[in-house]
Amino acid sequence: MNTPTLESSLAEIVSAKNVLTESEDIIPYSFDGTAAIKRLPRAIVFPSDAQQISEILKLARSQTPPVPVVTRGSGTGLSGGSVPVEGALVVCLAKMNRVLELDTANLTLLAEAGAVTQEIYDAADKDGLFYPPDPGSMRVSTIGGNVAENAGGLRGLKYGVTRNYVMGMEVVLADGSVCWLGNKCVKDVAGYNLRDLFIGSEGTLGIITKVLLKLLPKPAARQTLLATYAQMDAAAATVSDIIASKIIPCTLEFLDRKTIRCVEDFAHAGLPLDAEAVLLIESDGHAAAVADEAAQIEEIARKHGATSVRRARDSAAAAQLATARRSAFSALARLRPTTILEDATVPRSELAHMVRFVEGVATRHALDIATFGHFGDGNLHPTILTDERNTDEMHRVEAAMREIFDEALRVGGTITGEHGVGLAKKKFLPAQLGDASYTLLENIKRALDPDGLLNPGKIFD
């Protein structure tokens, strides 16, 4: 009697049409949105619910040796979090994509992990509700991936990140156990906060299958402003003064000169090509409060030397400016074969210094680096334009990244504000955490996944 193969056993769980094994089918799952990292999996499986995932994990553990399992949504990650290890089984949740419940009485939404973030926003919006987290990839990224990476976005300054909106989740553990963590209660302090343990865990502790999200009432009004500067320091001073004035805009974004020119060529949004920096600022809330806040912001911007301050005349113009910011990565990606979108966060008081430091790094290592990001929360995206086929240049890229992260830590920042650690940044993590905290992470991983089955090699070795 022939022993069933892993592939044939998977087909019994999910049906043969939901298992991919041919090379031309699995190659697209060998990489994610991270540049220069590719590894070929053994097979791809598309489950439809938590019970099938439980059976898949039990099957993977039963193999000799156990087969590693990597969870994947849309593959938009920027730290290598969903890149498989060689020979891994990729569990893709793309078919678990339903919005299951919109509870207007409790202001919550329940969705499967494969639901696209934009569709969650749209579902809430139809009922006059608001899901604030807005990662740049929200039109294609999935909510499970957002939770696993604790994704941020443009509205993070005022509204926070994904963690601030997760009230509960269904998780399948490495041994196949299915757990529900959290509930619809605004207050709940029963036991350890296990829900938060899985947010940002990057698929290393369990597979998130459903997410219960908190919603907010939809803001009644919005106003978008574009402030132009001849010096980056003036833009940074404007940001500091806005916050010091106890004004918290919905978004407070910036683009440097290189990014401005690329975005304008790409999106034709009317950005000023002679500026060293622009700030894209959005206020939202009650109409009267928004009008007052916008006036104060304009006054502060002019006080700090803004060469112009432009208000969007209507919602279409505001959407065009927002699209310009969201298209920064796409615009820059046209310049060189490889685009490495990095992610470091520093205290707001260090923003101007950090932007200048990145410029110096680019000069020292003869690299093309553009910088944009979320000035309001200190989150910078130095974007390195390179060619991964050029070995010498990639060595310089590695050295540049090391300098940028070392400096971010030196001034009290972090190696990642929203992209996660994954494969790309795990070598920098010990310097941020220190020995005891790093060991604590390892101990949690061993407790929940003693066989190292789930997303091995991510966050730490």
Image (cartoon, rainbow, N blue to C red):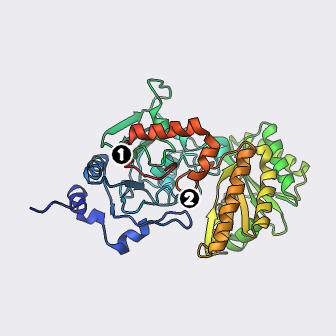
Residue 309 in view in this figure: yes
Q: Look at 32% across and 72% down and name the residue there.
A: 22
Image quarter in which the N terminus is found: bottom left
Residue type at mark 1? Asp
User: Position of 158 compared to 303: left or right?
Assistant: left
SS category of the residue bearing label 1: loop
For the residue pair 295 and 232, the one nearer the viewer reads as 232
Q: Which mark is residue 78?
A: 2
Q: What crowding class fits label 1: few (fewer than 14 Cα within 10 Å), some (14-19), or many (20 or more)?
A: some
Number of residues whose C-alpha sits closer than 10 Å to that of mark 2, classed few (under 14), some (14–19) or many (20 or more): many
Q: In the picture provided, is 395 more to the left or to the right than 46?
A: right
Along the line of sight, the residue nearer the viewer: 208 or 35: 35
How many numbered discs sit on the rendered protein?
2
Seen as rendered, the residue at the extreme top is 190
| Residue 315 position (above or below residue 245) | below
Which label number is shown at residue 50?
A: none
Q: Is residue 297 above or below residue 119?
A: above
CA separation in Å, label 1 and label 2: 26 Å
Q: Position of residue 256 (x, y in %)?
A: 77, 62
Q: Residue 432: image x %, image y %?
A: 64, 43
In front: mark 1 or mark 2?
1
Residue 363, horizontal then vertical, whole percent: 79, 66
Quick check: 301 left or right of 436?
A: right
Q: Secondary structure at mark 2?
A: loop
Image spot of residue 291 (x, y percent): 76, 45
The reply to whether residue 108 is visible in this rendering is no
Residue type highlighted by circle 2:
Leu
Q: Are marks 1 and 2 in contact (CB under 8 Å)?
A: no
The residue lying at 73 percent from left, 69 percent from top is 367
First along the sequence among labels 1 and 2: 2
Residue at the extreme left: 1
Q: Which residue is labeled 1 in the image?
A: 451
